[in-house]
Image: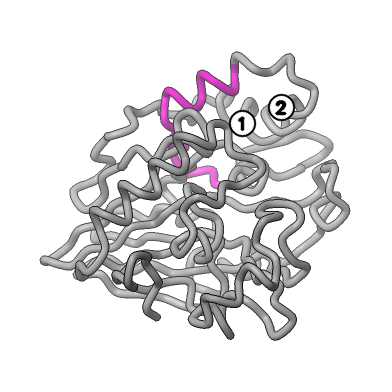
Amino acid sequence: MVSWQIGDVKITRVVEMVSEKGNRFILPMATAEALEPYPWLKPHFVNEEGKLIMSIHALIVETPDRTIMVDTCLGNDKKRDMPLWNMRSGPFLEDISNAGYPREKIDAVMCTHLHVDHVGWNTMLVDGKWVPTFPNARYLMADKEFNYWRDSRDDPSYNDIFDDSVQPIFDAGLVDLVDTEAQICPEIKLEPTFGHTPGHVSLHITSNGEEAIITGDFMHHPCQIARPDWCAVVDYDQTESHKTRLDFFSKYSDRPVLIIGTHFSGPSAGHLIKDGDNYRLKV
């Protein structure tokens, strides 16, 4: 487990999966040759073969009053198109318990967006039914994001994800739809980072003069800090996602704000700094 302290707020990373299989699925332009000008990516984010290292993990944010899980990874027992994601039986619930956060302790779940690898553990399979994994939690979702996916349920490529990981918690009355700039507790405010999905948000954490931001997927990998023009294949609006990265880097570079990447491997966090005409992550 890795954790960070931001004032009175503790942030703990719990990893479900790490992959070094390369870039074809998300960032096909990030070839080994294209990554060579950015040696700072090694060894944490790119391996010796020049392949991207990526992590799927949850971030548990413990404030003085709340225990919030940010994104819930892939989940178990779910039929998915990707073989490594299909019908998993991993130890995630045991891992979060070992980190000090048994599922009953979580009192809020915040989904940065509603893609497959961010909502999986919203639910778990019990006696053939999908039930909320965190029985004492309110599940927070941006209203713009929820409404988009609810209205897209006729899309067969997404239907199963909504049906097994979102609809059951909505039916249980546990979903709170919030504005994309909502203050969800005194220390945490949502920050719109649109483009990857229509209602994507990041989390801005402030406590005792210290700051951190949990990115979500407006960037999937630190290589996009050097190359904000590299858009993910799965971005809903690549023009908007590119602009979001440019605006974010301009706003937060060379500031004492810890950037915690939702898919960043290794240390998973660092500070944005100017690097000539580009930017990089200092870890």
Q: Secondary structure at mark 2?
A: helix
- Residue for point 23% across, 53% down: 251
Q: Which residue is mark 1?
A: 166
Query: How far apart are labels 2 and 1 at the CA level?
Result: 6 Å
Count of numbered badges drawn on the protein: 2
In the depicted structure, whether residue 216 falls above or below residue 15: above
Q: Amino acid at mark 2?
A: Asp
Q: Residue at x 57, y 32 (%)?
A: 236
- Say the numbered circle drawn on residue 117: none
Query: Dot 1: what SS?
Result: loop
Do callouts 2 and 1 mark residues in contact (Cβ within 8 Å)? yes
| Residue pointed to by mark 2 | 163
Name the residue at 37% across, 66% down: 279
29 versus 172 height, above or below: below
How has the structure been colored for display? one colour
* Residue 112, image x, y percentages: 47, 43
Whole-percent x, y for residue 107 in the image: 41, 48
Horizontal and vertical percent position of residue 103:
55, 56
Position of 76 compared to 217: left or right?
right
Q: Is residue 148 magenta?
A: yes
**Neighbour tally class for label 2: few under 14, some 14-19, many 20 plus, Cα within 10 Å:** some
Q: Which span is picked out in magenta? A: 134-150
Residue 252 as seen in the image, left or right of residue 192: left
- Give left or right: position of 193 versus 183: right
Q: Nearer the viewer, residue 114 or 283?
A: 283
Location of residue 33 by image quarter: bottom right
